[in-house]
Image (cartoon, rainbow, N blue to C red):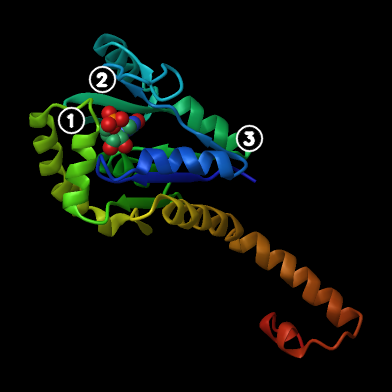
Amino acid sequence: MSGKLFVVSGPSGSGKTTLVTRILSTVENLSFCVSYTTRPIREGEVDGKHYRFVSKEKFQNMIDRDLFTEQAEVHGHSYGTPKSDIEKGIKTGVDIILDIDVQGAKQVRGIFDDSVFIFVVPPSLEILEQRLRDRKSEEDEDISVRLGIVKEEVACLKFYDYIIINDDMNAAAKRMEAVILSQRDENVEGVRRNMLAVAQDLKRENIYAPSFLKKFGLK
Ligand code: 5GP
């Protein structure tokens, strides 16, 4: 079976990156797609793990070579999802989780429309602002720019399949895990095919299961 894409978006400060990290440690067969970016590396970040940090020239060169599934300008820097990682995941049956902004999610929707789109929101704007201030890496001016973008991002909520309110990290992580696991079971075509085979066996063996058989037009 081919891998599925899980696209996670949400305003900065919503806690989506922490949530995604948590999920990666609890859900099997799920891999994080490491984006390319031109933004400077922050303290504590590891090149190749959190992002692949590249120059503007290298990023442009990758656009020219059509190496991105999607790419967008966010908060003045370029970010892009490498095609090679997505293709590898799909081919090898490993699900891929993307932490990308709303513009990028829109582009992915146009290419892989059976992806699952998850939007993470903070419990309130006040909490969001506080979380941004607690992060030492942002200047005050940057915070107000980011807060301004939040409204635009939240307007895109309607395009997402699931909304996760990050009021409590443990609870939110459980919800996200539940979304991913339930989507895996929803290979409806495959499940139905297996159930039909079971129903046919029951009928052939004359096993009494009327309501189950009825579902498949068998009596
Ligand atoms: P940060 O620089 O704070 O890590 O991320 C800023 C924003 O860029 C976040 O909303 C994050 O989800 C988004 N982002 C990270 N990687 C990508 C990417 O590859 N493509 C797009 N479109 N957005 C990304």
- How far is mark 1 from mark 3, CA to CA? 34 Å
Tell me the quarter of the picture where residue 104 sits.
Answer: top left
Instruction: Place residue 93 in its image quadrant.
Output: top right
The residues tagged by marks 2 and 3 sit, at their Cα atoms, a distance apart of 31 Å
Q: Earlier in the sequence, mark 2 or mark 3?
A: 2
Q: Label 3 near label 2: C-beta < 8 Å?
A: no
Q: Which residue is mark 1?
A: 75
Kindly identify which residue carries mark 3. Answer: 92
**In the rendering, at what x and y percent does residue 69 appear?**
38, 32
Q: Is residue 70 visible?
A: no
Question: Badge 2: how crowded within 10 Å, few (<14), some, or many (20+)?
Answer: some
Amino acid on which disc 1 is placed:
His
In the image, the residue with mark 3 has its CB under 8 Å from the nearest atom of ligand 1: no
Instruction: Compute the Cα span from label 2 to label 1.
Output: 9 Å
Q: Does 165 sit above or below residue 42?
A: below
Q: Is residue 79 above or below residue 31?
A: above
